Amino acid sequence: MTTQTATRSARTQPRGTQRPATFLDAVASEWIKIRTHRGVLLALLIGVGVTALAGANNTSANVRNILDGADAPGDLTGITQFGMKFGVIAFAVAGALAMTSEYSSGMIRTSLTAVPSRGRFLAAKAIAFTTVALVPGLIASTTSFVIGRSLLSGAGVQLDPTDPGVLRALVGGGLFLATSGLLALVLGALLRNPVATVGCVFALYVLPSFLGPELSRRIHPFEAGDAITRAAGGTAWSGYVILLAWTVVIAAGAYAAMRRRDA
């Protein structure tokens, strides 16, 4: 085709023709859906509140022990981040709602019409949710640390943000909560039902009661991943990798299931 022919062809194209949707368009669309979903936002807000409240309560208990003459715990940052163990369930519920609401509302048909590729749709949803959830996750870890630091200072115990491992623990807290929500999101893509997904999340949450503490820290996603919220210890990133591995395996199963079935 000559340059003149190509130019003439371009001029004769309908003016209303739109460019094909890109992956970034899909991410932007999912981001809008998630940040305007009241159930998801409420669950994330509850997660922040529960994390901060439980962390403050745990720190207060340790402060009372210190004032009674007990030695200060070795990992003060981990004491302040104790609430992560409870806030994680709210973030997981947020992830479950972000995905299963597509099926309960019937919106999944429209979503897959706009983005026919199941893999692209799932990846866009995952990126959008993680981006939204990471902010309240960081707020939860930072708020817990600030409150805990203030309580500890009242007992004459100093905890500084520049202490070794503290910054990593605070960022890790945000990653832990957001990734836990992402695990629930891909589980929702696999199960498609909000009740079944939330039920599985709760079952997974109480599983350590049957596994025992030692085994839970080695294989359980929430228990192992929680290690990244503590400043002391050498298992922080290896524990987080266990949480990531669970998420990736479930995501692969969800993708395979989505390819085999209709919306």
Image: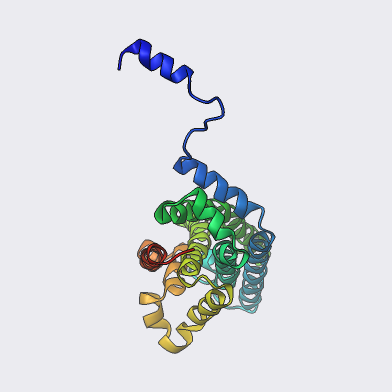
Point 65% across, 65% down: residue: 43
Q: Nearer the viewer, residue 67 or 50?
A: 50
- 69, above or below 41, in the image: below
Whether residue 163 is visible to the viewer of this picture, yes or no, is no
Point 41% across, 86% down: residue: 211
**Horizontal arrangement in the rendering, residue 25 relative to residue 150 (left or right):** left
Total number of numbered labels?
Answer: 0
Residue 228 in picture, x, y percent from top left:
44, 63
Whether residue 32 is visible to the viewer of this picture, yes or no, is yes
Quadrant where the N terminus sits is top left
User: How was the colour assigned to the protein in this rendering?
Assistant: rainbow
**Horizontal arrangement in the rendering, residue 63 relative to residue 20 (left or right):** right
Outermost residue toward the left in this view = 1
Q: Nearer the viewer, residue 145 or 187?
A: 187
Residue 247 in picture, x, y percent from top left:
41, 65
**Horizontal arrangement in the rendering, residue 65 relative to residue 4 (left or right):** right
Point 48% across, 51% down: residue: 124
Residue 78 in picture, x, y percent from top left:
52, 67
Q: Nearer the viewer, residue 126 or 144?
A: 126
Residue 117 in picture, x, y percent from top left:
41, 52
Outermost residue toward the bottom in this view = 210
